[in-house]
Amino acid sequence: MTFAVRKATAADDAAITAFVRAQPAATPFHLPAWSRAIERGCRQRAHYLIAERDGAIAGVLPLTEMRSPLFGNALVSAGFAVDGGVLGEGGEALVAAACALGLPSIELRGGAAPVGWAVDDTTYLGFVRPLAADDEAELAAIPRKQRAEMRKALANELEVVTGGAERAGEHYVVYAESVRNLGTPVFPRALFRAVLETMDADVLTVRHQGRAVASVLSLYFNDIVYPYWGGGTAAARGLRANDRMYFALMSHARARGCTAFDFGRSKAGTGAAAFKKNWGFEGVPLAYAKWSEGAAREINPLNPKYALMVRTWQRLPLPLANLLGPWISRGLG
């Protein structure tokens, strides 16, 4: 079967969006809006490829051209996403077109892996489960130990607020502190604003005595909520604000008509994966495929060669981390 492959333009966005929404394996990261938000927020060029048969879209491959003096250059599908590989038909033609773009490395997150490519299905786990019918049923779905912690969180004097781009500043303050404490650079502020302004997304923030202590930016797609960029300040742990945040998001998403909660990916064997399992989510291996002309780029912060960098970053004053972080992180993808 023959497919014609070309690079999409903004004029194709509506048709691509309709195609993506109709595919069972689609994610919000396949949407052209995601690629455009990444391009706008991180200044990394988008190459959105579409495969056509008889003039109709049959398959898509969203690509971000990552260029970084620290981490190397690569085409990533999809940039800054946990999914976004080939969707639909025409995979061989789409991958061939991606290789012809001339980057030394290509990373496909999800979708069918091309023959002969290296596949990693042991590093990351994905966590998804249906939302319960109401808050009481949601509590009952949480394993007993975590349920007890959740009830303590509900008893604390915490305020929950939601909103769109007007909440971006408050979210960024919390998220930046959270990732600095984990030893990783924060993404550019413009990335969060671009996603909030161009996609079905919002921010849910938990406050204590008027101060934001936990916040999450979530995506909504095909009746699934994706809590994507979330974190808490140093005070959040004692207040159990992160527990309150995710439970509140489940209720908020249910009210919006969502039926499933995608808790995102975590590295196998980490505390983050254990946290999600404690909430009643079972981890499912995620398969990522790579091709490279030489040594493939390595951006896993658990890699021993990054251990000193992580420890150093954790000790940086927050203003300095927030100044340097966006310049570094825009090349991670």
Image: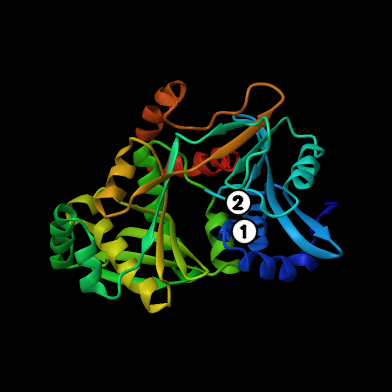
C-beta proximity under 8 Å, tags 2 and 1: yes
Q: In which quadrant of the rendered view does residue 103 lie?
A: top right
- Residue 291: quadrant of the picture: top right
Residue 42 x/y as whole percent: 62, 49
Please provide percent x and percent y for residue 78: 62, 48
Q: Which mark is residue 34?
A: 1
Kindly indicate the quadrant of the structure image that contains residue 204: bottom left
Left or right: 34 in relation to 104: left
- The image shows residue 192 at horizontal and vertical percentages of 52, 58
- Would you say residue 188 is visible in this rendering? yes
Question: What residue would you read off at disc 2?
Answer: 84
Residue 102 pos. (x, y %): 80, 35
Residue lying at 54% horizontally and 44% vertically, measured from the top left = 326
User: Can the viewer see residue 209?
Assistant: no
Could you say whether the residue bearing mark 1 is in a helix, strand or loop?
Answer: helix
Q: Which mark is residue 105?
A: none
